[in-house]
Each structure stands twice: as structure tokens, then as C-alpha cells.
Image (tube, helix red, strand yellow):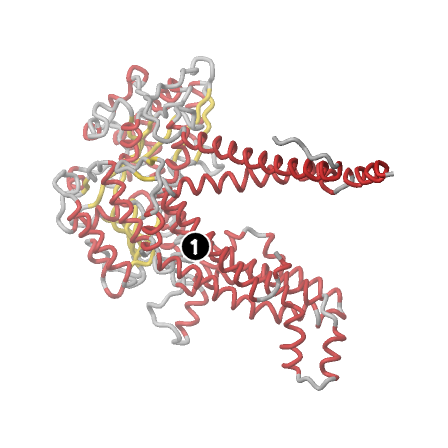
Amino acid sequence: MRSLPEDPIIRELVAQARASILTRRTILSGAAAGSAALALAACSPLGSTKTLSPAKDHSATVKSLTWANWPLYLDQADDKSYPTLAAFEKQTGLKVKYDIAVEDNDTYYAKVKDQLALGQDIGADTVCLTDWMVSRWITLGYTQKLDHANIPNIKNLSASLKNPDFDPGRNHSVPWQSGFAGLCWNKEKLPGGLKQVSDLWAPELKGKVGALSEMRDTIGLIMLEQGVDISGKAWGDKEFTAAIDELRKHVDDGQIRNIKGNSYADDLKSGDTVAAIVWSGDVEGINADIGSDKFAFALPETGGTLWSDNFLIPIGSKEKANAEKLINYYYEPEVAATVAAYVNYITPVEGAKEAMAKIDKSLVDDQLIFPNEDTLKHAHLFRTLSAAEQNKYNSQFQGVLLGA
Amino acid sequence: MAIAAFAGNATAVDATPRRRSWVALFLLLPGLLYLVLFFIVPLVSLIITSLESQGLDGSFAYGFVVSNYTDSVSTFATQIWRSFGFALIATVIALLFSYPLAYFIGVTARRWPLLQSFMLILVIAPFFISFLLRTLAWKTILSDNGPVVTALQGLSLMGPQGHITGEPIAVVFGLTYNFIPFMCLPLYTTLERLDLRYLEASSDLYASGWATFRKVTIPLSLPGIVSGTLLTFIPAAGDYVNASQDFLGGTSSTMIGNVIQSNFLVQQNYPAAAALSIVLMFVILVIVSVYVRRSGTEDLL
């Protein structure tokens, strides 16, 4: 720094000017430090390739666990309590927090993925997610390996679900419920019913058709009608794009009114839609809500999709053994039958059908809970997509939803 | 003598605002920290995100990918134009609806304070109920089996397959309805202070009612018009609730807010979502500054 001039007034002025430069500089450097810290903070969750290790299990001392699940997915009494869960708590002395946190696979994943990537607790010791999302978690190492010794009832798991391609041997995931995506219609407005997906494109249904925002279900049904074997590895971009084009055509010309998740039930009830692609178990729920047998469900002749939601234990959970006890409990045939009688989805537990005979005989032959061979022939699993395919197809599908 | 003069000067320098501003700066500190933490930091982070590159497996890496902007803007150009179009229509309708209302409450009803406060309560009361619930209620009212569609179909003003929800008209209606209080209240506060003697003077000078309105009332209430339209237009352009398919929208009425939501939460395409957010912010900033400058009310900001 140059020495200050002699004259005191000028000396004072120069000193002040320097001081102001200094403050400006301090501010700038402060901002730089701030943004550097920010960049560092933003860095960490990205691109980390280190392998995650499961959290230490505290189950022996902490007698509680949290279970994150979808809405309307567990038997519930009139007073809002969950009878089977209460029985489990009484039997084991564990305190279970049942958290209805999963609105759909993508949004739930978006909420917890940063903690998962760091191997931290996501506030749930077990979560039920759909096959393809479970597959993503397993690939990324976000799940803990299950100890089958703690889940002896896993022997009751239905044979067809024992070795899915994303988790052979079920070492990381166990099915909770399965279900179909198929067609639902308003019997008053459409006495003839629906037989196949193309019946939805009838001119008299213009603007009254709903579809699911779950890509694999809506596109799966359309692909099946176009003669594609959605379970096989043989199909690719060409087949998928053909189905997307079909969907886009009906969205653009106003045939399809809405494409959404669980809230499609409101549209059916209010009459905004008369026919829709829906999930099997929900139709009973809608009929129960309106107190009449107004809506019917069927698998299209060309086939519907079959999916499962699976228990998994996130990498950061400290109550793994407790969660395994819970899974084991829900694989008791009697418990599984009680849940199935309420939620109306397919139970993966062998022996539940026999147990159901004691609870409600009329449900034993319900094809939506205990499908027979004939029904299952019409239901297909959507093959596992690679991450690149998932990205590409999902953005095409979302493009149709957004009208772009 | 000279020294004494300098000494005096030195104390004068001591007392400059800069010295005293340390206290002011200290008092400002919480506000500044808040601004840095909750505005500057997220903004920088958003800009960094918007330039990231995406790998095939869905992971992101730092980069300088300007095509995030060009790609997302060209893919969603319709939705961007539509958002500003919807927001503009909703703002104009809200203004046309709110001005007479605010005039009535603020000027005509001045003689009856009880009526004035009662009407103000009517304008504000809907705020006591959640905005989501009110929009859902409209969805039910406008649904195909609801009173509006049934009546219109009964009068043959609408075809048997016609519907309102999911169409642009429902979204514009929802936007207008939800933002009317934001338009009405600023208009009311300026009109409430309107000096009626100006209006008298204007008619004393043989101005017609229309001329008085145009040359006196409107210019005097301009600050209210400007702040009301800004308070309506800005949130309406970025709104994603009304146009969401769960509420009043459909695939043909998607707005930019829904595109951003879908990119952030469903597709997890963070760079595209961040780029679109920045574009939205920038366009609004430009529109607002041009608007404020042209209407000559810079002091407002």
C-alpha cells in the first residue's frame, strides 16, 4: 500500500476510500466463500460410487419400527385402527408406526434418494414399493440383505413370485400384495361392458376415458393389445413408441380425459370418466364408498399387467430384525387372508385361500384375490427396464401426460 | 488555527453516515442472512443444477450443458406460451371483475362503514379455507354430473359429450377465482383513499362521467392496478395446482408449473426442471420490469 499523503484532510479521505474498497472486497470474498461451500455441499450426494454399508442393528434394544406404505393398503377398523397391526404389536411388544407415505413410486423415491445415497436413515425401517422401483433400489445397493432365518414363514411365498429377475431367491425384497391393471367401467352408463383396450376408443366414450399415470400399466395394456409380449426381452424402442403413439393419438383428440394415479377414483365417482384403466383392488373400494355395485372390473381379452409391491429394508434402517419380524407376521396365512379380505388385492401367501374360507367364504373364489390359472394366463409382468430405457421411456410417457 | 479547523473537520468526518451504518448493518444482519441463505444459495444451486449433464443411467454430473435450456424450452414451448396466456387472461378478467367491486367497497360504500367492512370480509373470507379444498370443490361443481354442466346441457348450450373440467376454460376460471382477492385488495386500498373532490372538480369542468373515470379515477388508482395485476399475474403464471390433472386441468391445459413439477418429482430430470424454473423466473422478471416502467410507477418496486 502506498504511503498516505501529507495533507490531513486528503489523508482522511484516502483512508476512507481505502476502507470502503476493503469492505467491498470483504463482501465479495464472503460471497465467493459462500458459493464455494455451496458447491461442495451440492457435490456430495452426486456421483458418489462408494458402496454403502447397512446401518448397525439396534433391534435388540429399540422395540419399535416404522413401516411406510401406500394409502388404503392395510385392513382398517371403523375407528381408524389397524386390527392386524395391533395384534402384531400385542404379540411382539414392538411399537409400529404405520406411515402412509407412499403416494407413488417416483415421488417417494425423489423424497428419500439423497439420504439413501449417503446410507442414512430415511425414517422408515421397511417400505412397500413396486417391482421396478425395488429393482432400482437393489441395483443401487439401497437395501439390506434379508436374513431368511428371521422370516421362517417365507416358505409360504407363492412359487411364481420366488425368483423375479430383479431379486432371484428374494434376498432383498418380499412381496406384500400383487394386483392387476385392467379395465373398469360404469355399469349404468355402459351396460355392455368392455372387453378390450380398444373398446375405450369408442366414439361414444369421447372425453370420458381415464388412464393410469403408472407407465407400465397404461402402456403395458396398449402394448399387449398390439400383440407385444411385455414380459419377453424381444421388444424395444419400436414397440414402445408404437404404443406411445397410440396413447398420444387418443390424448390429442380428446378421447382420454385424464391420466392420473390413485385419484382416478374421484373421476369415476363424479362421472367425469365412465371407463378407465385402473388397478384391480380399487374397484371394490370405490363400490364400497358409493354403497352400490356400480363399477365393474375385467382384464382385457388381450391381457392385463400383473405387478407386485414388495417389502424392502432401506440401507439406513437400524431396526432390521424388527422389520423382519413384521414381514414374517404378515406371511401367516390367517393374517394374510384378513388383509386380503380388506384390500382386495392378490395375496402372495400360500395357504391364505384355506384361511379365507374361515373368514369370508364368498371371497375364496374371488379372481382378484385368489386368481386361478385361467386368470393368471391373462396377466403379464412388464419386463425389467435398464436405467437408460427407464429414463427414455419415462420421459416419452411423461411428455404425453404433459401434452408436449 | 489550521489545526483547529482540521480537528473540527475530523469530528465531522467521524459523524458520517458510514460510521453510523455499522449499527444499521448489524440490524440488517438477520434479514441479509435470511436472504443469502434462502434466496442466493438456492438460486446459485439452481443455476448449477440447470447446467448439469445427465448420464444414460439417470445420474448427473457437473457440466456446462447449455442445451438443457434450449432442449427444454423447445420441447415445452407450447406450455410456456400457454402459461403466460392463461395468466394474462386470468389477470384481465380478475381486473375487470375486481375494479367495480373494489370501487363499490372503497368509494360508494364509504357512507356505510358497516357494509364496507362486511364486504371486505366477504372478499377475504375464502382465505380461511384451504386453497386446495376450494379448488377441489370447484372440480366437483364443474364435473360432468355437476350442476353447471347439467344445466348447460339442459339448455342445449353444450353437447351431450361436452365437459368443462380438464379444458383450458376450467384452468383459466380456477386461476381467476383463486387470485381475485390479490387483485381486489390493492385496488381497494388505493380507491379507498381516492379524494372525491377531484371527481367533483372534474365534473365542474364539464367532463363526462367516462372522461372523469378515464382521466381522474384511473390515474389516481394506477398504483393499485399495477400492484394488483402483478400480484395476480406472477403467481398465476407459475401456478401448478389449478392446471394439475388432479384438480381442474387436463392434458390439453398443462402449464409450465406442471412441467417443472413432473420433471422434478416424476422424471427426476433435475437439469431440465431447473432450466425451466430459471427461464420462468427470467421471463417474469423481464415482463414485470417492462410493465412497471411503461406504466410509470417505478416507485412501487
Camera-side residue of A221 and B27: B27
In percent of width and height, residue A48 lies at 35, 27
Residue A345 in picture, x, y percent from top left? 30, 38
Tell me the subunit letter for badge 1.
B
Q: For mark 1, give the secondary structure.
A: loop
Q: Is residue A84 visible?
A: no
| Residue that extends furthest to the bottom in the rendered view of this protein | B206
* A240 versus B182 height, above or below: above
Quarter location, residue B153 = bottom left
Q: Position of residue A104 (x, y in %)?
A: 36, 40
The tally of labels here is 1
Q: Is residue A337 visible?
A: yes
Quarter of the image for the C terminus of chain A: give it: bottom left
**Is A87 left or right of A203, judged from the image as shown?**
right
Q: Residue furthest right?
A: B1
Q: Is residue A58 above or below residue B22?
A: above
Type of amino acid at the residue the image marks with label 1? Phe
Residue behind mark 1: B247
Residue B211, relative to residue A222: is it above or below?
Answer: below
A333 or A20, nearer to the observer: A20
Furthest-front residue in view? A6
Q: A276 or A186: which is nearer to us?
A: A276
Count residues near mark 1 (Cα–Cα under 10 Å), then give few for <14, some for 14-19, many for 20+: many
- Give me the residue at 63% from left, 67% from top: B222
Of A250 and B236, which appears nearest the observer? B236
Q: Residue A163: which quarter of the image?
A: top left
Quarter occupied by the N terminus of chain A: top right
Position of A8 compared to B36: left or right?
Answer: right
Q: Position of residue A395 (x, y in %)?
A: 29, 46
